[in-house]
Amino acid sequence: MKSSRRERGFTLIELLVVIAIIAVLIALLLPAVQSAREAARRIQCTNNLKQLGLALHNYVDSHNALPPAAQGGMFQAYMNYTGYSFLLPYIEQTNGYNLFNFSLGQYSGGLSYQGWSEWGNSTAFGLQLGMFLCPSNRATGEVGATASVGWTVPRAAVTDYLFNGGAGRYVAKGFGETNRMGPFGIDTATRLAEIQDGTSNTFLMGEAAGGSQRNKFYASGTTNRVCMPLATYNTAGPVYYDNLMFMAYGRSRTWNDGTATARIIGGLVARTVDSVGNAYAVNDCASESYTDVFEPAPGLPFPTSAQKLPNFRSAHPGTTNFLFGDGTVRNVKDSIAPTVYQALSTMGGGEVVSSDAL
């Protein structure tokens, strides 16, 4: 005898209700997953800066001073090598350090300059280290090209962390506003004892996210600063903003990006004011760097010879990580008061900063 019992399935309405419930659960869960991933990336970014802090302090133990952001040459303007090159032995990259031939360079008047751009250093120029990249921003460098200096690298080494140049208009050693300077500049060799504001109240490095994937704007102008799209073409072609880690020359360079002649802008040292001294907020659009020959130049009146430098910025929502002189890494909110922000960037300004002002 056949059973009259029938198997009952989902009705269309019931199926739609189940799908709707699943969609709501996914919508609720996805932000939490993304938040957890960002928290993990921010922790990794913090750890990168802590490792760089250890490297800087180990460098000080060996040399009694912090490295320069860039090593000068002729007239202390034509650059040779960067502080990142000098830090390599202190982050277990002695082999990478040995890739550099520091004796290379163009010679004039008994001085060597532009050694970084010599063919013998092209392998070192492409040495990319994960410690210098913020995982919230990217995993690799983005600039690969034939440089006008005559050699090719598949990907130029880049960094998302820049040295702190302070809140003055100059980072070249020997120029004015010394009480507004940060610990790093051109040809500097700052001793920790010179950080009169205290190492716990002074930045050594901070995030300065490069690349064009997440940071699509760069600053044009000063008093009336305008954020220009990186995709904007100029007479040299497209513009790329990136901090080329070992390129000591502090101005834009012309590269062939494979499709057109491109302009590469970026920097090695960041600060908290622009080239005329106006406040530069955290995560403001990044400025083109211009620190070398004739910027500043002997004999030119101030502020004509002030230097253009990028600012600190990150890919983390609302905050940017900074390495302090005592080796700690702290988050600085985008909403920080400009006076406090600038005070933390100077090493001899004499400011008193409350611990809850960040």
Image (cartoon, rainbow, N blue to C red):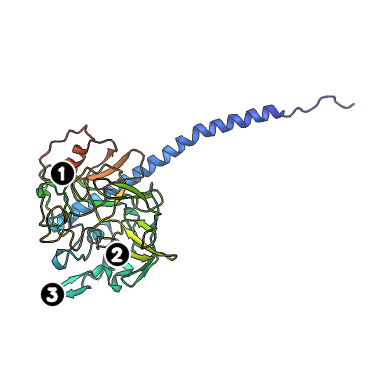
Q: Closer to us: mark 3 or mark 2?
A: 3
In whole angstroms, how far apart are the C-alphas of marks 2 and 1? 30 Å
According to the picture, the residue beneath numbered tag 3 turns out to be 110
Establish if 186 lies above or below 101. Answer: above
Q: Tag 3: residue type?
A: Gly
Establish if 23 lies above or below 137. Answer: above
The structure residue drawn at horizontal position 30% and vertical position 51%, both measured from the top left corner, is 220
Ranked by sequence position, the earlier of labels 2 and 1 is 2
Establish if 337 lies above or below 221. Answer: above
Q: Is residue 155 left or right of residue 191?
A: right
Q: Is residue 66 left or right of residue 40?
A: left
Q: Tag 2: residue type?
A: Gly
Residue 94 image offset from top left, x and y in percent? 27, 63
Q: Secondary structure at mark 3?
A: loop
Query: What is the crowding at mark 2: few (fewer than 14 residues within 10 Å), some, or many (at least 20)?
Result: some
Residue 201 image offset from top left, x and y in percent? 17, 40
Tell me the quadrant of the picture where the N terminus can be found. Answer: top right
Question: Which disc number belongs to residue 96?
Answer: 2
Ranked by sequence position, the earlier of labels 3 and 2 is 2
In whole angstroms, how far apart are the C-alphas of marks 3 and 1? 38 Å
Location of residue 345 (image quadrant): top left
The structure residue drawn at horizontal position 31% and vertical position 39%, both measured from the top left corner, is 319
Ranked by sequence position, the earlier of labels 3 and 1 is 3
Question: Which disc number belongs to residue 199?
Answer: 1
Query: What is the crowding at mark 1: few (fewer than 14 residues within 10 Å), some, or many (at least 20)?
Result: some
The structure residue drawn at horizontal position 35% and vertical position 46%, both measured from the top left corner, is 44
The structure residue drawn at horizontal position 13% and vertical position 75%, both measured from the top left corner, is 110
In whole angstroms, how far apart are the C-alphas of marks 3 and 2? 28 Å
Report if the CB atoms under discs 3 and 1 are less than 8 Å apart: no
